[in-house]
Amino acid sequence: MIKLAENKNELGFLPADPFAATVTALAETYGFNNSGFVRFYIQDDSAALSIIDGNATVCAGESADFEEISAFLNTAGYNTVKAEKSVIEKLNLSISDSSYIVKFIPASYPEPEGFVSEYDLREIYDLLDLAGFPTGEFGAFKADICARINHGAAKFGGIAESGRLLATCLRLFEGEKSVLLGAVVTNPEARGRGLASALVPFMADAEKPSFLFCRNDGLLKFYEKSGFEEYGKWAISVRGNN
């Protein structure tokens, strides 16, 4: 039976995977008393869900009751649902987008030349927006990223040169047992210099399993050459397309 989670200890059964990283990082950032902006639910020890501003992440094992989760999502209301591709299929949701998940192969990588751990958020936002990332409004982006960074649930890394931001990679969700990397962008003027291939593995956590969602299938080989291996597939379902 699905119930509202009241503290992070109730999420302790979650595995070290990218979806659990998202759920537990959000729990660390926003807590469990936030007037409905972020809500967390568990289904026994088989599944957990987070819903933030209408966007749901589902982490579910083989023993989960997918029929109940599907009915719950429809009742609770959502704009998008992101999960492992097989989970989206078991929920009988249409797939709006999908690609590979890659997992970091633990190794030591040197700090890239020009590495910065802090930078002006407006410039980060503008670079991500230029690359077509779904950044939304700047105010909401700033509030969410700052909240996660301030709670140790996210970390920024970039490469700058002569006062210009050339590449970015974030630990978007630093969860209890695992990390989800993302926001990997290189300024078009600096492509071909190997900046992302140096930055991304450096930003991975050598102790916690670190994952990344490829934006499209064509990026799989790039990440395999950058210290990652194929892990599975993510998928997102957008309400209205079902």
Image (cartoon, grey):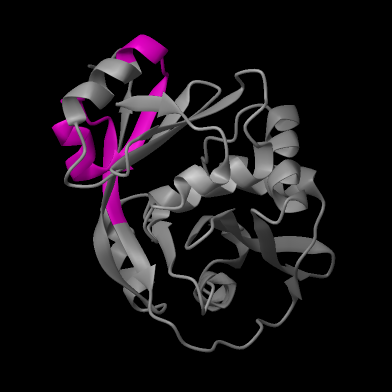
Q: Is residue 240 visible?
A: yes
Magenta span contains residue 98: yes
What residue do we see at 57% from left, 39% from top? 7
In the image, residue 177 lies at what x, y percent? 48, 63
What residue span does the magenta drawing correspond to? 74-100
In the image, residue 35 lies at what x, y percent? 66, 18
**Which residue is nearer to you in this view: 228 or 64?**
64
In the image, residue 133 lies at what x, y percent? 52, 41
- 217 is higher (above) or lower (below) than 95: below
Q: Is 123 on the left-hand or right-hand side of 45?
A: right
Q: Is residue 58 visible?
A: no
- 156 is higher (above) or lower (below) than 114: above
What residue do we see at 49% from left, 71% from top? 208
Magenta span contains residue 17: no
Query: Which quarter of the rendered picture does the C terminus lie within?
Result: top left
Using the rendered view, name the quadrant where residue 89 is placed.
Answer: top left
**Which residue is nearer to you in this view: 33 or 215?**
33
Using the rendered view, name the quadrant where residue 218 is placed.
Answer: bottom left
What residue do we see at 42% from left, 77% from top? 226
